[in-house]
Amino acid sequence: MKKSSVHIIMLQLVILFFVSCEPEYNPDLLPVLVTSDLINPGPFSVNTGGDISSDGGYNIKRRGVCWSTNTNPTINDNYSVDGRGTGSYQSSITDLDETKTYYIRAYATNRIGTAYGQEMMYKPILHFNPDLVYESVSDHEGNTYKTITIGNQTWMAENLKTTTFRNGDIIKENVKENIYGKQWVYENKMNNLNTYGRLYNWYAVMDSRNIAPIGWRLPTKEDWSILIQYLIQNGFNYNNGLIDNKVAKSVASRTIWSFSKTRGAVGNGLNSNNASGLSLVPGGYRDGTSSFKNLFFNGYWWSSSEYNDENAWYMFLGESSVSFISHGGSKNCGFAVRCIREN
C-alpha cells in the first residue's frame, strides 16, 4: 500500500511538472508573418505563400496558407502545409471553382497557437477572351473543350486531356520506355490536368488509332503557318502592324504566364493577351530523360509534320516571346496537343 501511495504521489508530481512547463497563452508570443503576393493566377489555381519574420520564441511547427469562400479563413478551412521554421515559403492553391471568390491568408503555428497574415481576395481569372464566342467539342472519353474559329480554321482552345485512343485503347502512361505512345500530366500531379491538359510524345499523337476527337485532327506545320499568316494580315500583331510575326500575345492566355520586361511579349501585360481566343497556356514539357520543365514559362504544341527521322515540328511560345514560331524537337518529348477541325 505504501508503495502504491508513493507511486501515485510521484505521478502527480510528474503531471504537475509538465503542466507547469506548458506556457500560458500570450498573443505576444505568437509568430509574426505576412501573406505573399498572389502569382500565376488561373481559373483553377493560384500561387502564394508567406514570410515569417518571428517565431515568437517557440519553433514553428507548421506553416502554409488557408483559404475559403468566406472571409477570415483559418486552419479549420482548406489549408496547405509547407514546411516548418521562419523565413519565406511558397504555397500552391488548386482545384478552385472559377465561378467563386476566395479569401486567402498565410498561417504559422508554434507552441502558443496559430497566427495569420493579412487576407488576400482572389477571383479566379479565366484563360479565355470574354469578348469572343466559343463553341465546344467533346472527345471519345467525354472531356469537353472550348473551341474558337479564327479565319477559316476552327481550333480547340484548350489542351487535349484524353488517356485513350478513339477505339478505347489506353495510351500508355509513366513507363520507362519513351516510344510507342505515351502521355503524362505535368509532374504526374493531377491538379495540373484541368489547366494544362496532358503531355504526349509524337508517337502517341501520330498513332493510327487516332488521338483526336471525331471530326478533328492534329494540325500540320502548314496549318499553324496559315493561322499565323491570318493573324498577321488581320491586325493581330501587338503593334497592329501587318508585317512580321509579332502575334505571340494574341494567341497566349491572359493568365499564368510569368512576367517579362520585353515590350510586346506574352508576359508583358497579360490583360492585353488572347485577342484571337486561342488561349495557349505555359504548360511546360517532358524531356526524353523523364524530367518535367518550364511550367509557367513556356508552352509547346505538336504538329503532325516530321522534321526528320528523330524529330518533328512543334510550335513554341515563351513568356518573352513576341513571335509565335515553329521548331524541330525530339519525338520522344512530351508536348501539349491542340486539335484542328477537319474541313
Image (cartoon, rainbow, N blue to C red):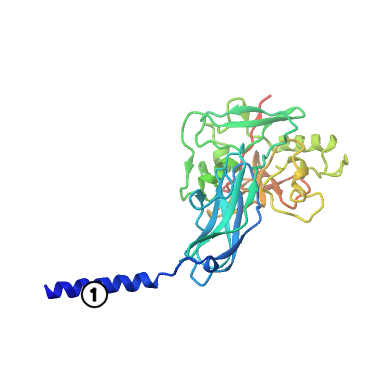
Q: Where, by quadrant of the figure, is residue 248 drawn?
A: top right
Query: Up-down: is 180 above or below 90?
Result: above
Q: For the view shown, which residue lies furthest in the left direction?
A: 1
Query: Up-down: is 232 above or below 188?
Result: above
* Residue of label 1: 10
Specify whether 321 is left or right of 42. right
Query: Up-down: is 29 above or below 138?
Result: below
* Mark 1 crowdedness (10 Å alpha carbons): few <14, some 14-19, many ≥20: few
Q: Residue at x 83, y 42 (%)?
A: 237
Which quarter of the rendered picture does the C terminus lie within? top right
Near-viewer residue (296 or 57): 57
The number of numbered discs placed on residues in the rendered structure image is 1
Which quarter of the rendered picture does the N terminus lie within? bottom left
Query: Up-down: is 117 above or below 95?
Result: below
Q: Percent position (x, y) of residue 105?
A: 58, 54
Q: Percent position (x, y) of residue 286?
A: 57, 50
Near-viewer residue (178 or 274): 274
Q: Percent position (x, y) of residue 63?
A: 52, 60
Near-viewer residue (250 or 232): 250
Q: Percent position (x, y) of residue 142?
A: 53, 29
Specify whether 37 is left or right of 276. left
Q: Where, by quadrant of the figure, is residue 10 drawn?
A: bottom left
Near-viewer residue (307 or 125): 125
Specify whether 261 is left or right of 283. right
**Kind of residue at disc 1:** Met
For the residue labelled by badge 1, is the local secondary structure a helix, a strand or a loop?
A: helix
